[in-house]
Image: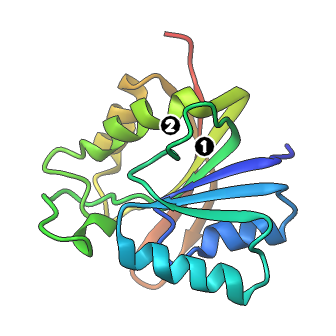
Amino acid sequence: RSAQRILDVGTGTGVLAITAARAGANSVVATDVNPSAVACARANVRQHGLDSRIVVEQADFAPRSPGAHFDLVICNPPYFKGVPRNHAQLAYMGGANLEWFDRFTYSVRPHLTLHGRALLVLSDAADLPAIMERLSAGGWAYRVVARRDITIEVMYIVELVPRNL
């Protein structure tokens, strides 16, 4: 399915945003709450010559523009339990009970187009049943669309599609 407008939540270095633009997305908005990550992603976007197709914003989830809608949201979320105490820990700690996934749902779903979806990168090192329970409770239908075994863990790409509640 073609995704023309993409939102990359928690962009970090911007690698997913850059990959999406290079794969043909018309426009990508990449957000991150960490100002250092935003600076890094902007530098990487510039280095790849993609300034005209990728906008990097400092924001927690969705961009500040309330009317922005996306065909696809991509994210490598903070999937470990724990309360982040600094910006670096925000990249991998999703709260004591993984509350980050609730905030993702309420922040991102209003920005999806009619047939919009999300792709999350998750690891078997995380509490996957708890994450899937939170996402399901938030109104997402989900399925694993890719799996890759690496030396120390199994990585999954999980597709989320909004369910009618």
Question: Type of residue at label 1?
Answer: Ala
Q: Nearer the viewer, residue 67 or 95?
A: 67
Q: Which residue lies at the image location 85% right of the left edge and 43% below the top edge?
A: 1
Kind of element beneath mark 2: helix
Q: Residues within 10 Å of mark 1 (few under 14, many from 20)?
A: many
- The residue at which mark 2 appears reads as 108
Q: In the rendering, at what x and y percent does residue 44 appear?
A: 62, 84
Q: In the rendering, at what x and y percent does residue 77 appear?
A: 41, 58
Q: In the rendering, at what x and y percent does residue 38 appear?
A: 47, 72
On residue 118, which mark appears? 1
Question: Type of residue at label 2?
Answer: Val
Q: Which residue lies at the image location 39% right of the left edge and 39% below the top edge?
A: 132
Task: Please identify the residue farthest to the top as the structure is shown.
Answer: 165
Query: Going by the image, does 32 lie left or right of 148?
Result: left
Circles 1 and 2, Cβ within 8 Å, touching? The answer is yes
Kind of element beneath mark 1: strand
